């Protein structure tokens, strides 16, 4: 099986490029697409999803601009990508996805609120994150859901948006939940059934509209004020 990627411009309804492929050992997926950089992650071992590498890809030059091996992704906030080496004693560090350079605490804001595009992207939490555990407890209490693997999370306009993976026999179901400030469920949608891998960046908010894709073929949109 071969995975390829294409970039379609919604403004002029034309492909910028088609059928881009990489010579990787097992599995490569898109982790995030922010500005002019796509963050790809490579799963190097089919038996261990923690064995992965990540690289930044410039959509204009169609070249990788940086890469990090043997890493665990801890979350994305705007242009700031948090990473942790596959070592129990390693510390979390953050890089600018546009350059691959490490971001120091004293530097300017790289978070969602510093982005000019108006797009609100969720945080992506993996299983070894404290935030993941917190989201898991919330879902267990308010939706009786057993969270596994990874999740996308965002708070906006008094609402809580969660894209969660749940175990179903030997496969995963990716389900989307929206809660109000009282913990009441106001929307639920199945994004993918019988999935064999973990998804990220499964929804976003732009121009006060919630947008996501169901089963890789149906784009759905909700006005935030109607939720």
Image: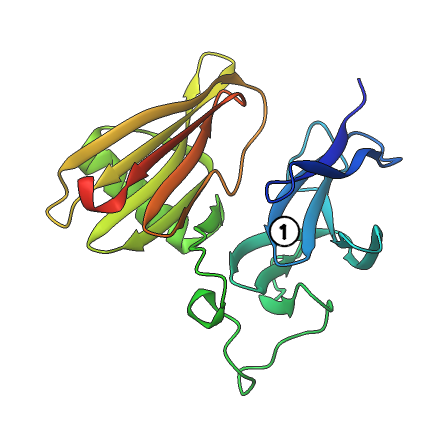
| Residue 173 in the image, given as x and y percentages of width and height | 44, 21
* Residue drawn at the location 38% of the way across and 53% of the way down: 131
Query: Residue most toward the front?
Result: 12
* Residue drawn at the location 51% of the way across and 43% of the way down: 201
Res 227 visible: no
Query: Residue most toward the top?
Result: 169
| Residue 58 in the image, given as x and y percentages of width and height | 77, 56
Dot 1 crowding, Cα within 10 Å, few <14, some 14–19, many 20+: many
Q: Which quadrant, please, contains the C terminus? A: top left
* Residue drawn at the location 79% of the way across and 29% of the way down: 26
* Residue drawn at the location 80% of the way across and 33% of the way down: 18
- Which residue is the site of mark 1? 72
Along the line of sight, which residue is nearer the eye, 162 or 226?
226
User: How many dots with numbers?
Assistant: 1
| Residue 120 in the image, given as x and y percentages of width and height | 42, 55
Judge left or right: residue 177 versus residue 53: left
Q: Is residue 134 above or below residue 185?
A: below
Q: Is residue 221 above or below residue 215?
A: below
Q: Secondary structure at mark 1?
A: strand
Q: Which quadrant, please, contains the N terminus? A: top right
Query: Residue most toward the left?
Result: 182
Query: Residue most toward the right?
Result: 23
User: How are the residues colored?
Assistant: rainbow
Judge left or right: residue 90 versus residue 222: right
Judge left or right: residue 172 versus residue 82: left
Judge left or right: residue 124 versus residue 22: left
Among the 4 quarters of the image, the one containing residue 45:
top right
Res 160 visible: yes
Among the 4 quarters of the image, the one containing residue 99:
bottom right
| Residue 93 in the image, given as x and y percentages of width and height | 61, 69
């Amino acid at each position: 099986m071969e995975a390829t990627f294409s970039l379609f411009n919604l403004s002029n309804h034309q492909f910028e490029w088609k059928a881009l492929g990489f010579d990787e050992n097992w599995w490569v997926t898109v982790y995030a697409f922010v500005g002019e950089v796509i963050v790809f992650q490579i799963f190097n071992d089919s038996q261990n999803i923690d064995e992965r590498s990540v690289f930044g890809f410039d959509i204009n030059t169609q070249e990788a601009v940086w890469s990090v091996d043997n890493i665990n992704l801890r979350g994305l906030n705007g242009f700031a990508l948090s990473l942790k080496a596959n070592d129990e004693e390693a510390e979390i560090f953050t890089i600018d996805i546009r350059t691959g350079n490490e971001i120091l605490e004293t530097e300017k804001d790289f978070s969602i609120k510093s982005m000019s595009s108006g797009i609100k992207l969720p945080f992506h939490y993996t299983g070894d994150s404290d935030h993941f555990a917190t989201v898991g407890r919330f879902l267990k209490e308010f939706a009786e859901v057993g969270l596994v693997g990874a999740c996308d999370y965002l708070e906006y306009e008094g609402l809580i948006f969660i894209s969660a993976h749940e175990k179903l026999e030997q496969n995963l179901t990716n389900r989307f939940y929206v809660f109000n400030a009282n913990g009441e469920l106001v929307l639920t949608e199945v994004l993918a059934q019988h999935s064999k891998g973990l998804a990220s960046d499964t929804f976003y908010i732009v121009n006060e509209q919630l947008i996501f894709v169901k089963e890789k073929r149906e784009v759905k949109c909700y006005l935030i004020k109607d939720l």
